Image: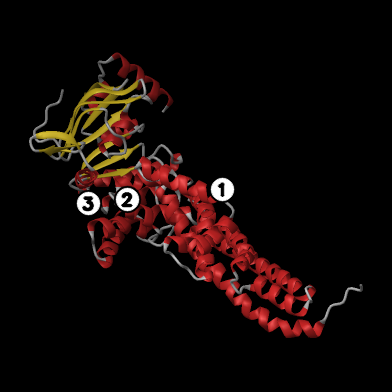
Amino acid sequence: MNQVDNPMVRFENVTKRYGSHTVLDKLDFEVAANEKVAIIGPSGSGKTTLLRMLMTLEEIDDGIIYVDGEPLTHMLDGDRLVPANRKHLSRVRAKIGMVFQHFNLFPHMSAVNNCIVAPLTVLGLSKDAAYERAAELLDMVGLGDKLDHYPGQLSGGQKQRVAIARALAMRPKIMLFDEVTSALDPELVGEVLKVIRKLGDAHDLTLLMVTHEMGFAKEFADRVCFFDQGKIAEQGTPEEIFSAPTNERTIQFLSAVLETG
Amino acid sequence: MMFEWDWNYTWEILPILGEASLVTLQATLLGFVLAAVLGLAFALLRMSRLVYIRWITTAIIEFIRSTPLLIQIFFLYYVMPEFGLTLDAMTAGILALGVHYACYCSEVYRAGLDNVPKGQWEAAIALNLSPYATLRNVIIPQAIPPVVPALSNYLVALFKETPLLSAIAVLELMQTAKILASESFQYTEPITLVGLYFLVFSLISAALSRQLEAWLNTRHGGSR
């Protein structure tokens, strides 16, 4: 197990079940600040669930998740850890942003309004400040000329870039990318990956991405984790995982993916 | 007896009915505003995380939907004074119409709310929006436009039920027509005119609602 000093994210003995099916099984997992982690694995291996639990979209059944040194799923009551209430969840998850496979943009708002609604209502920014920041971010993702376009008027790749700008507008320390290119036409994947690459260079961000883009994971990530049946079956640098995997399941998975990909 | 339409009498009563129609319109609009607002409140309460709030709201809605509007009107006007709540006829009528139709509207809103994709709620959580901001900025603006046609059907339905207020002597169209007829013993003209009035206004509001629907559909560059 990789031990990291002052991890930005720490899963401690986390279990998630759906009925009798165990999706994540006593998972221990740490991510260092500013680390870029790619999570790969067959479908149903629990990798998306991992991100969704971190975003508080799913409750955990056992264990604790820590974010930036404090518990996310729990809070201190005296010296005892109890399940977090709404207020605590809201305060801690403010450090996390997420981009979804299916964009989940607000269809009734223009691109720029998608990016200012949360800064206005949650961070309490002024309209001008929020607009300026949103315009800056949309420009950064290459959509400076599409501020007033509605999601219905944008391509999939453009929508996903708006979604990235929208998440960044909340100034997260951690960004979660959940198969963000899986719903895109192949010719649009590149423009989204380009933006993510830019984030890796320019921002003070911890990045966790569930992905099927093995090529991108290989050149972009600091660490690759291979998930299988609710556990990390193997993890290491991209070179270790892609060039010299040791786990039988990793070898099978990679040969299957790389053959078809 | 030969059927005869008395034009002189028609012109004589038309302004009187015109005035009464304002009362009908007022009852319709105020009743519907109440129905639209209270209906949304009912629909949201039925989504509460607290099971007993959901249960109580559902029970109230089922109770109101399962009893006749006329009885509710009578109840508010004649029975509530026994409990110390005396309402004038118009207020009692508007209240009864509004609350009754709020229950129908709440079902419509509920369908609209259920149709907002789960991903929209999740995006709101990921952006850390409060529950209130989520409903106000994200969910309700998407839930309502698709159900506007259904809501406007209830507006027309409510409008057509306003003659029930004649039962507690609100001087709306029907009550006025009845009074005119009983004075002149000429029923044909006043009752026909009232029928025509309802027909014309129903047709107008149906046309308006189609316009509104078309406008709602073309905004924002179409669908998601």
**Kind of residue indicated by mark 2:** Pro
**Kind of residue indicated by mark 1:** Ser
Q: CA distance from mark 3 to mark 1?
A: 52 Å
Q: Residue at horizontal 50%, vertical 58%?
A: B99
Front disc: 1 or 2: 1
Residue beneath disc 3: A171
Label 3: state its secondary structure.
loop
Please provide percent x and percent y for residue B136.
Answer: 37, 57
Residue A243: image quadrant is top left
Residue B131 marker = 2
Residue beneath disc 1: B66
Q: CA distance from mark 1 to mark 2?
A: 32 Å
Viewer-nearest residue: B20 or A203: B20
Please provide percent x and percent y for residue A67.
Answer: 17, 38
Hey, which residue is sitting farthest front in the picture? Answer: B82
Relative vertical location of residue A117 with respect to residue A175 in this rendering, above or below? below
Q: CA distance from mark 2 to mark 3?
A: 20 Å
Chain letter of disc 3 in the image: A
Please provide percent x and percent y for residue B104.
Answer: 54, 53
Q: Is residue B154 left or right of residue A144?
A: right
Chain letter of disc 2 in the image: B
Q: Residue at horizontal 43%, vertical 25%?
A: A260
Hey, which residue is sitting farthest right in the picture? Answer: B1
